[in-house]
Structures are given as structure tokens and as C-alpha cells.
Image (tube, helix red, strand yellow):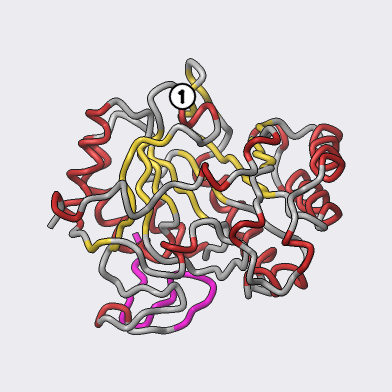
Amino acid sequence: MSEIHTNSCLLCPRACGADRAHGKPGVCGMPDTLYVSRIAPHLWEEPPISGSRGSGTIFFTGCNLRCVFCQNRTISREGVGHPMTEEALAERMLALQEQGVHNINLVTPTHYTARLARLLEKVKPLLRIPVVWNSSGYESVETLRMVEGLVDLYLPDFKYISSELSSAYSAAPDYADRATEAVLEMYRQVGKYREVNGLVQKGVILRHLVLPGCRADSMAVLRHIASILPPDEIRVSVMRQYTPDFAHDCPHKNLHRRVTEFEYTSVLNEAARLGLEGFSQGKDAADKAFTPDFEETFSPKTDP
């Protein structure tokens, strides 16, 4: 396993060089110490991930993107979370497994990859359930190789093709290039999508959130995915859950409304035309009520 030190952090495509090992936050907003904002079973992932007993989600504090519409901004921007040792987090993973969850779901883990690789090397032999890497897609290939063999399902976003959109909405003009490299590496590591009894075991599910006024870019994202990966060996989740509740203070007026039926249906039709299989959402998904309460579901009293 290669190692990327956090005393000059190069873990993500930002390559900000922050001395996170000595407490200086990177672009992600976090030092090297693990900060976790929520650990709990979650029933609102794609059906083969949530199943009947939930996905064992672990939400990490901080994020290397700066999405103006982020629904989890309390943890991605505002630092809500609590420090944990690697040993304590490993114990919580095993406790989730004993609760009966279908997988261990690491949410926004990129900026902690070095620590998580070390942790997973120890705990993976004790897990009987898959490990899910749930990320923004803005990843570096070298960093992903640190968790090769330790992750079963990659669940990345593929947010944009347009560098104009990715620059304006996520401050990442190189997003599409980096996400392309990342998803190709993910597919190389885990291969063809596989389910057993309706539950995912291995593979790649690419998520795409349809944004209001961005229908053409959404369709271009799907065409790009179908051109770089075998459509019958991956799954795509076309998401309708965008809500303007979290973008009220952003300057982009199109983001102040919900996605229309025409916009979403057009994108789904394009996915079908391309032969992409996967998941869609109903209109009621566009509700801020589906965003977890990060201040109420994690107790620092139970963790060192």
C-alpha cells in the first residue's frame, strides 16, 4: 500500500499541501484527526444498499468540495462532529455489524483515506459484510489505491461534465477529469456489479444528482459514463432529491427551485437509451426531511 503523508497533504486533487498531521486544516476544513458526525443504520440509500435493516453509515466531518447546494453543510462546512480514535471507530464498525446492518458505509471519507486504509486493514478480516466507499467522485487515483482490496462497493458521485458548472457550483474546474480517472480506477479494483439476494456485494454504483436548469449537462454525464464503462457491468443512480432549501444564499438563481418533471424524465430517458441500468427517485425525495440530523444521532459520550 502506498502512503500519502498528511504533513503535506496530497490526498485529493486539491493537493493543498496543508500540514494536517500537525492540526492545520486542509481545503477539506479538517486536520488529520478523525472527526465523525453520525454513526447509525440508514434506510434511505439505494434499495440494494439499505435492504431491510439499513446501511451502517459513518458520516465524516469535512469535504474537499465546496458545493453551493450541499445538503450536509453542517458537517461539510461547519465542522459538526466529534474526534475519534481509529480503535474506537473500528469498534463502532463491528458494533454496527452486530446490529445487523447490510454493509459499512463510509460517507465523505476521501480526506481520511490514509487513516481509513490503516484501520480497514485491521478490521476487514472481522467483517462479514461489504465496505462501501461513498464519495463525491473528486478523488485521486493514487489515493484510491491505498484502499484497494479493502473496499467492496464504490458509490461515487459523478456531478458534472461542464467545467463551467463544476467551477461555479463546486469550485472544482477539473472535476470531470478527476472523476473520470477515479471511476475508472474504482471499476478496475472491484469489477462487475454483483448482488446476492437483492443486496449489493461488490461493484460500482455511480450517482448523479439532477440539478435544476442543468438537464443538458446531466445527459452529457450519462453519455460520458456509458462511453468509459461497460453499461451492463455498473449501475447508475439518477437522483431527484435536489432541494433549494440548502442553496438559498447562493447567487445562481436556477438553484432556487426544484427540478421539474420534464427535466428529470428527460435524464431518465437518456439513461434508458444508453442502456444504463440502476435506480431512480420519486418526486417526494426532494424534501429536506431526508437529510439526517447530525447533531442528534451521535453521542460523543460513548466514544474516546
Taking depth in this image into account, of 286 and 202 the one nearest to the observer is: 286
The answer to whether 23 appears left or right of 146 in the picture is left
Residue at screen point 73% across, 54% down: 211
Residue at screen point 38% across, 28% down: 102
Taking depth in this image into account, of 54 and 201 the one nearest to the observer is: 54
Residue at screen point 54% across, 27% down: 47
Quarter occupied by the C terminus:
bottom left
Q: Position of residue 152 (x, y in %)?
A: 43, 39
Q: Position of residue 137 (x, y in %)?
A: 57, 57
Q: Position of residue 17 (x, y in %)?
A: 42, 84
- Which amino acid type is shown beneath numbered disc 1? Gly
Quarter occupied by the N terminus:
bottom left
Q: Which residues are magenta?
A: 1-16
Q: How many marks?
A: 1
Mark 1 neighbour density, 10 Å: few (under 14) some (14–19) many (20 or more): many
Residue at screen point 51% across, 27% down: 48
Taking depth in this image into account, of 118 and 209 the one nearest to the observer is: 209
Secondary structure mostly seen in magenta is: loop
Q: Which residue is mark 1?
A: 51
What element does badge 1 sit on? Answer: loop
The answer to whether 89 appears left or right of 274 in the picture is left
The answer to whether 254 appears left or right of 38 in the picture is right
Q: Quadrant of residue 274?
A: top right
Residue 158 painted magenta = no
Q: Position of residue 112 (x, y in %)?
A: 35, 63
